[in-house]
Image (cartoon, rainbow, N blue to C red):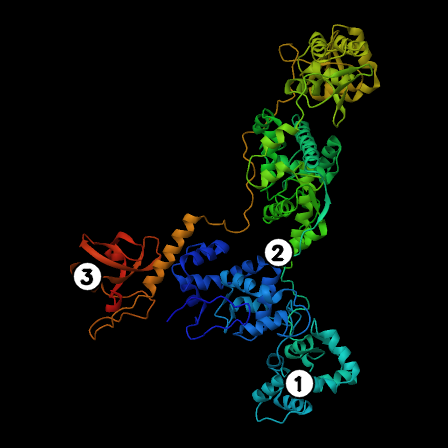
Amino acid sequence: MEATVPEPSSATGSATTSSAPRSLAEALRTRDDAALAALLHARPDLLNPVPGDVTQLATRAGTRASVVRALDRLDRFALQTAEALAVAPDPCPYPVLESLLAGEQGTTGEDNGARAELPRALTTLRDQALVWGDDARLRLVRTARELLAPSAARPSPTGLGPTVAEATAGMSPTRIQEIVAAAGLPATHDPVSAVAALSSLFTDPERMSALLDEAPAEAHQVLGRLVWGPPYGEVTPNPTPPVRWLRDRGLLLPASARTVVLPREVALHLRGGLAHRLTEPLPPQVTAHREHRPQLVDANAAGQALAALSTVEELVKSWEHTGPPVLRAGGLSVRDLKRTAATLDATERTTAFWIELAYAAGLLASDGEADERYAPTPAFDTWLELPPAQRWSALAAAWLPATRTAGLAGEQDAKGRTLSVLGPDLDRSAAPEVRRRVLELLAALPEGSSADPGTLLGRLAWERPVRGTSTLRAQLAQWTLTEAEALGVTGRGALSAFGRALLEHRDPAPLLAPLFPEPVDHVLLQADLTAVAPGPLRRPLGDVLAVLADVESKGGATVYRFTPGSVRRALDSGRTASDLHAFLAEHSITPVPQPLAYLIDDVARRHGHLRVGAAASYVRCDDDGMLNEILVDKRSAPLGLRRLAPTVLAAQAEPTALLDGLRAMGYAPAAESSTGDVLVTRADAHRTPVRSAPVPVPDGPPVPDATLLGAAVRAIRAGDLAATAVRKEPGPASSPAGVPGELPRTSPAETLATVQAAALTGSAVWIGYVNAEGAASQRVIAPVRVEGGFVTGYDHTADEVRTYALHRITGVAELADEHL
């Protein structure tokens, strides 16, 4: 008879055992559909593929890979509870487990809430199918016990060692009897009873205390060093008298020729019955570090958000002409990272974050050419046309779920190779979960409060304490705090209002837009050849000014400087001197300074006087005196110039190199097309083909939705119904129906006759069926029609009418009368 698994009692944990499940499969079978769906939701790896029945589900839930993944996602106290069960008797009564975690009932001192929190931890372990059985017979699944139980090669997190029985498994019977006699116990007739007597002594508090009272003081010091782990210690061939005293009485047992171990029973007595030195039943509270006015936090975060937009735009535009090449192994070289960091006036680590963010948002990608380089994508042009608040929302929406981790750039992988920005090995599937969890903890604080980093990291470590993952999660949390501040999700360490909207899957743009300053359509020209933009510039003005001048400083007001090179750059883009004068007069609220007007006219007068084309390349000029001047200049030697005609010089250098060389000499040449026209160059000429943003790497199987869970539970119930259906005992002349749970085997003639008879009588039969993919299943059907090599009937396991090919039915059996 089956019954529901009882929940643990917080007081005594008492429960009846008459109907206790005898296996994990039986325990799962007693769960209702909601509890089964909760298990599949918590452990989605169990769904791939959908188990055929509850037995398959239980088997899969006990596999090593699945159990390791489930243990990795336990909080610290749930994991400590599992660790205590791994060193407890199997099965373990609830009071024994309670004493391992909280001490004996009635003992003085605080249990730190362990006694009250133990039912919650047990419920978590039961829900995850890591523990089964009632409170009188709690069982940890075998694989979890093997992973958490102590061994010489893999010490237990509890610090406990093997039991007396395990430690004496290879010991000679004579030696065991010597230990029993030295401990003051009567001799026994066999080693098994001797080990049992020794274990009984070590677990009897009164007799154990009396034995330890006889120990030398130095022996207590030896035990004190081993009691909380590790329980192993080295000894010399001639140990000291205190160690010899402990070894002779079995309080230390040999683990190898030069190693002894403290038995688990002895350690538990010395610990007062506790499995852990410190139990942590309650999560650490995240405390506020500083408190600010929420309006100040939002204003500060909005300023950071605006700076982030400017930085990303500057970064992507700096790669428009000739982006950095893609390394053969993928990613960006250290030299190109340094060059980009200098362009952005930022550190390399910060620059790596902005590059990865632009890549995650789909604004940057490799162009796929033979000489592969990174360049803006067409999506960058679309992004530029969005309002500032929506542009920020796009960046933040790409950052939150991204698995690419810029903080790893520059570190080395397991093979000693340096991880590069935009390289293939920067994905960490835990990053989105940690990022979101950090923001959730910030959101739980009062508005305007920043978190104390120590308590925040402590909370994350409590929630995922498994060694090997906790270190990475701490790094991810620290990077999240830094990145959120740089991006503007937080301000002064506190979560902003629009950052909270992002976390809650709401559009943050309406909250952010009022905090952004209105774009301006004017600048202030100054006599020192600079222009001051008192705020963010509107798109056409900002684009033209970025070509006409160089950014000198950023901040609340951006300062641009006009130079001969920047003016020439504007003339190269196809604008004339009159266009530039008109543009500045239109957008400056101050008169155009005379030095700036002279600079534009002077550069324009010389611009295009020289013409460069392809021969390999050539220089053309109506002023042969200027050509003579160039020829005699020693700086022109690397260009390989020679005169072809009074007004033409040929060069061995390519046109681009020739242009750069002449400009370095102080001239202002213009590029020329094959028809002799001035070649206009555009700043936004290069774009990659259409590229999609990188897809985050999932952290294991995706979490199933309600529809998939419902279908999976129905399929498991259907398979379980067929697998546990009771068949009639076969007659003497009939073929054996087989062992319950196995597919029936009958001849084609018997199969046809049985299903025809069932169709006539309206009864149900149990069949084995192999589909076109070769997957075998068991079904309970009520045939209604048999014709043309097919049987059509109501499938009780699928709860619908289906048709099956007769040649794919492996066998058929009638159901017992009580199951019809």
CB contact under 8 Å: marks 1 and 3? no
Pinpoint residue 738: horizontal percent, then vertical percent: 30, 70
Image quarter hosting the C terminus:
bottom left
Point 50% across, 56% down: residue: 43
Residue type indicated by callout 3: Ala
State left or right for residue 522 relative to residue 726.
right
Q: What's the CA distance linking mark 3 and mark 2?
A: 57 Å
Residue 758 image label:
3
Residue type indicated by callout 2: Glu
Q: Which residue is mark 2?
A: 463
Q: Is residue 489 above or below residue 384?
A: below
Q: Which residue is mark 1?
A: 206
Q: What's the CA distance linking mark 1 and mark 3?
A: 71 Å
Q: Quadrant of residue 367?
A: top right
Pinpoint residue 575: horizontal percent, then vertical percent: 67, 12
Point 80% across, 18% down: residue: 665
Q: Quadrant of residue 316?
A: top right
**Circle 2: element type:** helix
**Circle 3: element type:** helix
**Circle 1: element type:** helix
Q: What's the CA distance linking mark 1 and mark 2?
A: 39 Å
State left or right for residue 701 relative to residue 176.
left
